[in-house]
Image: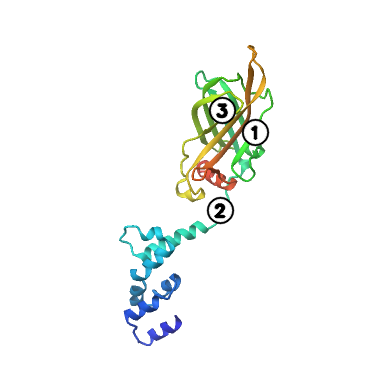
Amino acid sequence: MKKMVETHSHSTTLSWEILILIAHYLDPKTLAIASCVSKSWLHSMSSDLLWKPILTTHFPSLSTLPSNVSYCRLFALGHGAAKRRRQSPSKPTLSLGDLIFAVSITSNRDSRTIGEFSWPVDALQEDPPGVFRFCIGFDCGGGVAVRNEGLEEVVKVTWNVVVKGWRGVFTLMDYVGKMGFVGGGEEWFSQELPAPGCCSKVVASSVVADMRVGMCGCGESDDGGGKVRVGKISVGILNVDDWRYVGIEDGLRYLQHFLLT
């Protein structure tokens, strides 16, 4: 490249055809550098004849878009987007120690409380470790309502995330549905949660909140049947593309967009 530039500086003008022939052997970065030599080189090195096969190789989805934008420009856009994706996201400002989970389960018929719980998140068990899913178990008589086994009831389920000191509140789940008081328990999913706006890259795709309530036996009813109560609650944030729980830091980055604004 240095030799070509020196030749050009001595007033020996390379023909457009020769420049194009040379350019076919250059990689995208060198083409971009060469286009800065002069206006004629910019015109030659930006030719769609050169950049279309490069774009097709590196970003095939962009090469099929109907567009008036040059292939060189489309490559620059694709390259910039790929570079941003490779950047490591910043550490979340929030920590688990800043948050409290508040969960309530009430009868939709008469608003009776079936279970109401509030926990500092850093006191909960990560299940499994490293992902944004937490669980807590309850001892018999731990403040949860007891129901006859087999009963089915329409309930309202709410899960709020609170920043300590009431500096922010975000509702992850507000759901009405049936709850069966049986040994296996129930699981609910929220509607798709809102995207975090300009910071959407912190979570790569759509997410939903997940809550699983497990029941356990707790004595006998008056008619000789069994009684059950809430024995365990698990909550988490799921990626709907692969139905896996997001990581701890991804979950915190998502929440801080709504809690710290």
Q: Say which quadrant the N terminus sits in.
A: bottom left
Which is nearer the N-term, disc 2 or disc 3?
2
Mark 2, residues whose alpha carbon is within 10 Å: few (<14), some, or many (≥20)? Answer: few
Residue found 32% across the figure and 59% down from its top = 67
Which is nearer the N-term, disc 3 or disc 1?
3
Element type at mark 2 = loop
Report the residue that reaches farthest toward the left: 68
Q: CA distance from mark 2 to mark 3?
A: 33 Å
- Give residue 136's mark: 1
Name the amino acid, label 3: Ser
Kindly report which numbered mark, 1 or 2, lies closer to the viewer in this rendering: 1
> Residue beneath label 2, please?
90
Residue found 30% across the figure and 61% down from its top = 68
Mark 3, residues whose alpha carbon is within 10 Å: few (<14), some, or many (≥20)? Answer: some
Which is nearer the N-term, disc 1 or disc 2?
2
Residue found 48% across the figure and 47% down from its top = 205
Name the amino acid, label 2: Ser
Cβ–Cβ under 8 Å for marks 1 and 2: no
Name the amino acid, label 1: Ile
Quarter occupied by residue 27: bottom left
Near-viewer residue (32 or 64): 64
- Percent position (x, y) of residue 88? 55, 56
User: Can residue 47 be seen in the rendering of this structure?
Assistant: no
> Residue beneath label 3, please?
104
Cβ–Cβ under 8 Å for marks 2 and 3: no
Residue found 43% across the figure and 75% down from its top = 26
Near-viewer residue (26 or 41): 26
